[in-house]
Amino acid sequence: MTRKQPSFATETVWAGEEKYRVHGASQVPVVHSVAYTYDDLDYWYEVAVGNAEGHIYGRNTNPTVASFEDKVKQLEGAESATSFSTGMAAISNTLLTFLTPRDRIVSIKDTYGGTNKIFSEFLPRLDIDITLCETGNHDEMIEEINKGCQVVYLETPTNPTVKITDIEKIAEAAKEAGALVVVDNTFATPVLQNPLQLGADLVIHSATKFLGGHADALGGVLCGDEVLVDRVYHYREINGATMDPMAAYLLIRGMKTLHLRVWKQTENAGKLAEYLKAHPLVESVYYPGLTDHANHDIAKQQMRGFGGMFSFSLHGGMDAVKEMLPKLKFANRAANLGAVETTVGPARTTSHVESSPEERKALGIPDGLIRYSAGIEDFEDLKADLEEAMKAITVTQ
Ligand SMILES: *Cc1c(COP(=O)(O)O)cnc(C)c1O
């Protein structure tokens, strides 16, 4: 009798580790070694040129980092994965691998602030043409893709207004145009969405966020077809944005609970979004799980759950935010997200700190928008905390 493929929850705990647990260790050891020694010079050469398995130098590969990559690869159902020092390194290295002068990239206006800076500041210097479409306007995006491009770059749900793009639909148009489809899957995580199965060529994560889940390690990862991933790996091994083995260890440990955390965070976010929506001091709530969300139906179709992230604004604007946010007891007021602790912050100092007030306005991000990353705490405690903090608000319009 053949055993069935293990389920996702089991994979988060076990995948990618066995090969790396040397000396009978039950956990993947952290290999703090810059280089690897070889007495057999011919064998060393074979490893160096990639004909035999092994490690040569830490900027290229490391066993702990390789185990991290194997785990994510299996969770995303990918052929291959490579890692980076941060999520931004994964994004920039990927774009710089595939784009050359006079190429064109089509993306959305609502990408992560750092990604948006790459589009607005760094790629134009290389004479790369960038077209940013209204997020969620599929007709506009398909029209732009049909004009010809090399890369289509998506992020769904987006940061911080959680807008949704239909990956399958856009990937279809991109295929016809011969363009690569890259998806930042940081917000959804492989628990809730697998872009590769929806037609994307490459998927990126800021592992700093949900994958690690404990806000104690930075990292980025890219998954997809082996030939494509190898090209980005080569760019990274030379340019040097390598993941640290200690970070890899922390991220592996974090991922063991990915399944549990993300479902709990999704449950908390969904209930809190509903609660806030009914609150008289709240102006609007952005969450793909709300039926009045512009692309709720698409989210429902391509995601298994709506995720742990939402944002909301208050009638009293930024002044009210300043009164309310410091009163929260069970929330870090911080720039990260996806941690076990609830994390909050105004978009202007978190996701879009890199953008100017004018740029944020153009993106439809109100100054008083609060990004809320639900943690794994008890829902009733989080709700009571919000309710209590709202009482501090004196500015109501
Ligand atoms: C945080 C984040 C990034 C950047 O990741 P770092 O690890 O901070 O470099 C990219 N995309 C999204 C959606 C993010 O939230």
Image: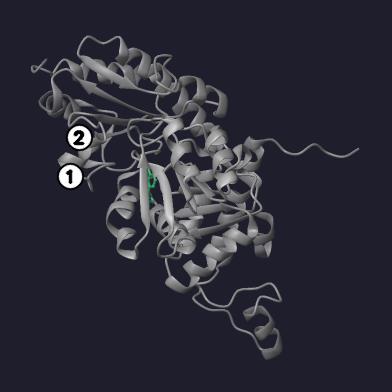
Asked if one can make out residue 111 in the rendered structure from this viewpoint, the answer is: no
Q: CA distance from mark 1 to mark 2?
A: 9 Å
For the residue pair 140 and 196, the one nearer the viewer reads as 140
**How many other residues sit within 10 Å of disc 2, few (<14), some (14-19) or many (≥20)?**
few
Q: Which colour assignment does the render follow? A: one colour
- Residue assigned mark 2: 361
Give percent across and percent down for residue 164.
Answer: 44, 30
For the residue pair 39 and 46, the one nearer the viewer reads as 46
Above or below residue 15? Residue 233 is: below
- Residue assigned mark 1: 356
Give percent across and percent down for residue 93.
Answer: 44, 61
Q: Which mark is residue 197?
A: none
Q: Earlier in the sequence, mark 1 or mark 2?
A: 1
Residue drawn 17% across the image and 24% down it:
324
Asked if one can make out residue 185 in the rendered structure from this viewpoint, the answer is: yes
Above or below residue 115? Residue 370 is: above
Give percent across and percent down for residue 28.
Answer: 59, 57
For the residue pair 326 and 394, the one nearer the viewer reads as 394
